[in-house]
Amino acid sequence: MDVLESIRKRRFHRSFTSEPVDEELLARLVWAAGRAPMGGAELVRRILVVTDPDLMRTVRQVTPSFLANSPAVIVICTDLDRAEASMGVQGRDTLSLVDAGAAAENMALAAVALGLATCFVRCANDVALQEVLDIPENVRPDILVAVGHPAPTTTAPVKNPPAVIFRNGFGKIWNPPTLPLPGTRPPATAKTDVSELFVNVLYLVASARDCIDEPLIYGPFRMIEGVSRMLEGARGDVFLSQMKAEIDGQKYSVMGDRVSFARWLDSLLRDFAAEAKRRNSPAAVPAAAVDGRGR
């Protein structure tokens, strides 16, 4: 099923049949949740699948908002210690919740394609749920996704009110076309002539503010990204052109392997230090004639 069709058909169900959910279907839903983004590419998400009838009954009893009679529930959790260590307080309190919502929606859309039904529940009683499901204190239950086969219903889906959509500034109402227009592109708009210097300075100022709340490791990334942007106009300098290519090829490695990222920064710094020494020597060869390794 096309993903747009899944979005169109998705609805929350609070009435399910008693038919158990097949293991393979549960595995596919968990896979879909795992495909959702995680801030900093850190493994802070924890997924708990509950199918035991006695546990399901107890979960409903300690979660007053859990009105569905689903035979299974998938609990999306966050390891708070790991989230704070990798992404700071902002990551623990905000980004991880965004990620949990993305994982839940992935499951909801996958469920439509698999012929299943879902309903989201926010547990307001973390302590009770932690006790029932043996969840450690440092792991926060974020969203409960009720899962099952939909029961026949004559109730029409509740339609969400139309979103208030702005464009190019808050308060500037945009009424998008009702139907997509495949194969067409919006007319090109003239770009405002803004100097590269201003754009780079703005990036650095905005990054400085972001670094206060972001995980510490984002600071080096933003600085090296700023270097890459400043090197856009260094095409006549062989060394700087080579360094830009290397930076652009390696800068995102911080998201996957911080140790390797640190080693790469050390290597990059050595290259720049060697180049500085060469350029400051009395018999320096013009930079345009020297490659990134001083040759």
Image: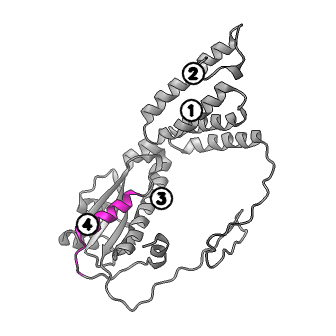
Residue where numbered disc 3 is placed: 98
Whole-angstrom CA distance, mark 1 to mark 4, is 44 Å
From the top left corner, tell me how far across and down residue 108 is, in percent: 40, 70
Q: Is residue 291 left or right of residue 47?
A: right
Residue where numbered disc 1 is placed: 246
Q: Residue 24 colored magenta?
A: yes
Q: Quadrant of residue 54?
A: bottom left
Q: Nearer the viewer, residue 42 or 211?
A: 42
Whole-angstrom CA distance, mark 4 to mark 3, is 27 Å
Q: Earlier in the sequence, mark 4 or mark 3?
A: 4
Main secondary structure along the magenta-highlighted residues = helix
Q: Which residues are magenta?
A: 18-35
For the residue carrying disc 3, how many other residues have a C-alpha within 10 Å: few (<14), some (14-19), or many (20+)? some
| Residue at the farthest top position | 282
Whole-angstrom CA distance, mark 3 to mark 1, is 32 Å
Residue where numbered disc 2 is placed: 271
Whole-angstrom CA distance, mark 2 to mark 4, is 52 Å
Instruction: Say what amino acid the circle numbered 1 marks.
Output: Glu
Q: Quadrant of residue 115?
A: bottom left
| Residue for point 57% across, 42% down | 212
Is label 1 in a helix, a strand or a loop? Answer: helix
Q: Is residue 37 left or right of residue 178?
A: left
Query: In which quadrant of the rendered image does the N terminus lie?
Result: bottom left
Residue where numbered disc 4 is placed: 24
Q: Earlier in the sequence, mark 3 or mark 1?
A: 3
